[in-house]
Amino acid sequence: MTTLDRGGPGAPPGPPPGAGRGRPTTGDDARERRRALAGRLDAKGSPYLFIAPFFLLFGVFGLFPLLYTVWVSLHEWSLIGGNEGFVGLDNYVRLATDGKFWNALYNTIGIFAIAVVPQLLMALLLADLLNRRLRWSGFFRIGLILPYVTSIAAVAIVFGQLFGPQFGMVNYLLELAGVDPVDWRGEKYASWVAIAVMIDWRWTGYNALIYLAAMQAVPRDVYEAAAIDGASRLRQFWQITIPLLRPTIIFTVIIATIGQMQLFTEPAVFGTDGAMNGGTQSQFQTVMMLVYQEAFRYGNYGYGSAIAWMLFLLIVLFSLLNVLVTSRIRSAT
Amino acid sequence: MTASTTGSAAVPAAARRPSPPRARTRRRSGGMREATPLTYAALVLTLVLSVFPLWWMFVVATRDSAAASARPPSLLPGPNLGLNMERLFANSTANFTTGLMNSLIAATTVAVSVVLFCSLAGFALGKLRFRGRAGFTAAVVVTMAVPVQVGVIPLLMLMEWLGWRGELQAVIVPFMVSGFGVFMMRQYVQQTIPDELLEAARIDGCSTFRIYWSVVLPALRPAMVVLGLLTFMTVWNEFIWALAVLTPANPTVQYSINQLNLSAFSRDFALMFTGAAFATLPLLIIFVVLGRQLVGRIMEGAIKA
Amino acid sequence: MQNLLRPGWRAAIAAAGAGVLLAATACGGGSGEADGEVTLVVDTFGVFGYEELYQRFEEENPGVTIEERNITDLADYTPQLQQNIAAGSGAGDVVAVEEGILVQFLQQADRFVDLNEHGGAELEANFLPWKWEQGHTTDGRLIGLGTDIGSMAMCYNVELFRDAGLPTDREEVGELWPTWEDFIETGQQFQEADTGASFVSTIFPYFNVLKAQEGDHTYQNTEGELVIETNPAVRGSWETVTSMAEAGLSANLPLWSDEWNAGIQNNTFATLPCPAWMLGHIESTAGDAGNGRWDVAAVPGGGGNWGGSFLSVPTQSEHPELAAELAILLSSPEGQLAAWNAANNLPSSEEAIDSADVQEFTRPYFNDAPVGQIYGASARELEPVYFGPDNQAIDDAFRAALESVEQGQASPDEGWQRAAEEAERAAGEG
């Protein structure tokens, strides 16, 4: 990733302006020296000054809270009582046997899985549709990312109503089709589907554009050769397009993983009780919702931090796994 | 909690890894397949599904709550938008006016700040020579992959300690820089600003900051607009942190519409949907203005992936 | 966090942030001031009905403006109030405190103004004795002045009772169910009549009524220890209400949900525990079409309490003197009567309960039921119930568990197990 252009000329401190004019007076000399000094200071110091705001602000509001999470997680720490003492790994021991944590993790990964697989397949299909000689292609592309540019909470409210048990439009349509209405908030897997629909609605078009760009980079002659060999369109798609797109696909999976492991807004708004319980039996409570519930509803900062840190480690683990898989595949090709 | 979520918009930019050489050679759409009527049908269906929830939001916002549960559903706008807006802005639970103003202020401030700080750092990392540059650049890249949201609990403690609990700066200051922004600006600086230009300015006696201000910033304008608007979108959409740190009296717009969603006595769908529509409106304006560039950005990034 | 940085840093960081945001900070919450003008912020939930009193206070105190911030649902209001109190900023100058959360605040008494110091001590005669006691800490500080009490009655749907062949006169209906066993039996009769409706909407509110009737404390004892497994009031109430669900009496509509509200309109269920404040909700939900459809009878088991509040002044208020004055006015017998007239919040003042305003009050919408008399009588039988510091969060857990049982997602035993585990988390004993 560190593809720095070391050869780039940067900004070498040239000779101080006016150095060659040769004024004789000592006062001017002093000014010259001061200027030269200022120029050197500028050249030496400016880069650090320029990057300082980023690193300072990130350090205070990004990195520090992240690391301090570990410290808090090693303590009995509550909203009201404050720091009630060091407890070592107790919070993590509790976590390991906490059914609610495992349930939340199961929900998070489950929702991720049933959201991401259809999403990427649909995106591939859409990209393939767009990757043709097409009228109004610009219009279709822009239309596809409309969902991406909307307010998540607002759309979650709308979907929450559409998936209402008695008055929702989805159940209405199901009934028209002769299917029994579904309890979208009460049944675990149904609730996952409802949330996955919200996620996919937002991200499918976006991923389709990414795949489209990658498809356009595939040279035509590859297909032409295949066509001469008599490979069908479908075969070409599976045997040429998909393998060539593999790095892109894996990349979108990684990004989706990092994002979806922290899934919060959609399920939080979907469960309208505000208690962050994610349904009467935590049917769709995600890990991030559990963190919120423990820390900000129950005031258990210590245990909440332990869950948060565990989530962090899991995200890192998943990402590393993905990188590993990616590089395997790349070296294989 | 720095505005890392922006990174999701930039997915591909982050993934500029070398791809198989064959994929590099781009060709015009010479042997491209023709679209069939089925292609169009599928695309139109997708568009309809994409638009429908937004249309439905607008329909209920212009009718009354009964419309949300009517069977068969009414799919055309009604006459009640004005009435619903009046009720929305007068609603003491939602504090919608405050929420809207707060979100506008926060999203704008953060967007300006991210653009400035990130272009400053991106310029330094992209063009200036200094000890540790490679290390700093690598550090920026790493910050992009760090899910800082996980640190909400200490961040909230920090806010309490600063006395910012419930105050607007609590949803501004933590987001004021973004690793994604720095990286994007660095790429753009390297691509678009010739070294000769900087050299010439240097010989004219410009200080480094002056060069940044008068030479680099103007050249970065297109990238700054995209970064600024993406950042605006991220801050506008931020939810979990606002929920944790703000109060109903001083909400952001997302917090405010969630209050309507929770108002358990009787959830007033016309009111909720009107709020949702207003919370979406600024983003739709961005979409209209920026749609084309956004498509370009997403796809441009992807090629380099 | 306190010891990480020297105080200077904290100021510097805060100033740096504030400097960037001069314009923004003007939007901060809390009480504001400009040229001697004072704004007092009152935080409430549900309906308190204080509008006229605010006007009076503003007239009596020129330069004072009162702003009420209202959140409908207590379950949303309470955590936010807790956070504001703990954070030391963001709370109103006068805050409504529901009895379920009061105990937690009594333990943080230093965060509230001792109203004894502002003339509160002479007000004892204004309140029912137990309500007066509840507002005190063990060492005698007065931090909460009582407002209303949630004395209990049973609302029933006259049309559905008629269809099911049950009596419809409120006296006779009350005589159907002296005890909860009788109530369940009546329910079974009702279901057998097959009106298409259910006897109860959801079992959770009945659980609330029952556990308040059956003991002087609920989930936590006065030491703050979790006692759900040993307190018969909790376990017994659980068994009674889950048996209602098993007998098929429930329509399984989560309290306050859209479907539940629609149920009030569409005759989906026949009874509903009715604290005084519920009447207003039924009336506004059922609308004109529901006029005369609901009536009010006595509750099984006699008495009972659901809800009821206090007013407190957080020490973070910049105008404690004025705020205390306002709290005293709002909770005075006069103030309580104004709230009764505006919203039927039953007064906690004996004087107010005995007044003609309450005793002679009838509600046309409920077939002219003499609701003042009904609730006033029930109020005298009230025994105060102690609610522990984590009452609200534990209550949320029990509600979720009861809903999962009645919706058939869990057996009563599984539901209990789940609620108990969640209660331990909420109480910080997990």
Image (spheres, coloured by chain):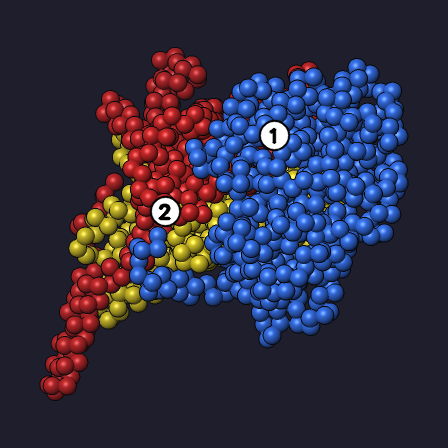
Chain colours: A red, B yellow, C blue
Q: Residue at x 51, y 23 (%)?
A: C417
Q: Where, by quadrant of the figure, is residue C69 drawn?
A: bottom right
Residues at marks 1 and 2, CA–CA distance in whole angstroms? 34 Å
Residue in front for this viewpoint, C373 or B234:
C373
Residue at mark 1 shares a chain with residue at mark 2: no
Q: Residue at x 83, y 43 (%)?
A: C373
Name the subunit of mark 1.
C
**Residue tagged by mark 1?**
C233
- B8 relative to C306 in the view: left or right: left
**Residue B126 can be seen, yes or no:** yes
Secondary structure beneath disc 2?
strand
- A211 relative to A140 in the view: left or right: left
Residue in front for this viewpoint, A39 or C400:
C400
Secondary structure beneath disc 1?
helix
**Residue tagged by mark 2?**
A83
Residue C236 at x, y = what percent?
62, 25
Badge 1 density bin: few <14, some 14–19, many ≥20, Cα 10 Å: many
